[in-house]
Amino acid sequence: MTTRDHAMRLLGHRLKQAGLATPDLDARILVQAATGASDIEMIREPGTLLTQAEEKRLGEWERRRLAREPVSRILGSREFWGLTFAVTAETLDPRPDSETLIETALDLLKGIPAPRLLDLGTGTGCLLLALLHECPGASGIGADLSAGALAVAASNAAALGLDARAQFIESEWTAAVEGRFDLVISNPPYIPHGDIEGLDEEVRLHDPMLALDGGADGLDAYRALAGLLPDHLTHGGQVVIELGAGQAAEVTAIFEAAGFGVSRVVSDLGGVPRALVAHMPRV
């Protein structure tokens, strides 16, 4: 038998020895989840003994984490924009860098009382649902090629009480999408095919390839979207799209060649250009 505090320190040490990036944080999250303790209980009751069932559960989770399975995959959920999203093998793991898209989009939506939103490659639905959570008058569609991802997104919408304003459809980009939207948001696949083998195991082995592989140069999705989106934007509608590291200039050129104006590129907290904002110039 061991205490919460000892279990946390021991697990953190093992994860650190294995070379994981955030061993202490991972250990705390896993011990708290295994025991069902609240934040306050973790602080006030570090000497509480784990039950045999909790020790067994934590031991299994340790084995999976040492095998480079992300904590979010082990627990089946990930926090994004302060909201909890279920994640499965069919969905990309939402990452903090993508919150830059939400901040950027919310700034663009100011003054639009009931905007229509389109999220392409919706995955867990985190981008669309975070925006709907912040904009009570908004409604939107999340499109994805994966039926499994769409089921997860719909479940997340229901869990967050946003299902009345969110619709999810199976579509290859805009193929099954009808109508025009005030804002289109997307985190498309942008990893060059040849770089995938070199990705961290947490990403390469656990994120769906459909959400990672951006073609030979990583830019296939941007070319497709630049050609499709003009037919789905309202007059004055805008696009917010996630960028991979080092892709800002190339993606800007792709959208400008398709007739868009690129108004800005927004960097994430790490200083990496992460969100590109584009619009069709007014005639």
Image: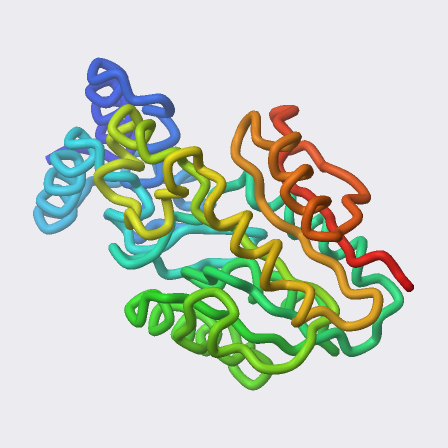
Residue 193 or 199: which is nearer the viewer?
Answer: 193
Image position, residue 150 (x, y; %): 37, 71
Residue 283 or 31: which is nearer the viewer?
Answer: 283
Q: Is 109 displayed left or right of 59 in the figure?
A: right
Tell me which residue sits at (67%, 37%) in the image: 253
Tell me the colour scheme of the image.
rainbow
Image position, residue 192 (x, y; %): 39, 33
Please tell me whether residue 142 is drawn above or below residue 24 in the rendered image: below
Residue 199 or 6: which is nearer the viewer?
Answer: 199
Q: Is 220 displayed left or right of 279 in the figure?
A: left
Q: Quadrant of residue 205?
A: top left
Numbered label tally: 0
Residue 29 or 153: which is nearer the viewer?
Answer: 153
Tell me which residue sits at (28%, 59%) in the image: 90
Tell me which residue sits at (68%, 51%) in the image: 258
Q: Quadrant of the N terminus?
A: top left
Image position, residue 68 (x, y; %): 21, 32
Q: Quadrant of residue 165?
A: bottom right
Residue placed farthest to the bottom in the image?
A: 164
Please tell me whether residue 196 is drawn above or below residue 179 in the rendered image: above
Tell me which residue sits at (15%, 32%) in the image: 67
Q: Quadrant of residue 12?
A: top left
Image position, residue 243 (x, y; %): 57, 39
Q: Quadrant of the C terminus?
A: bottom right
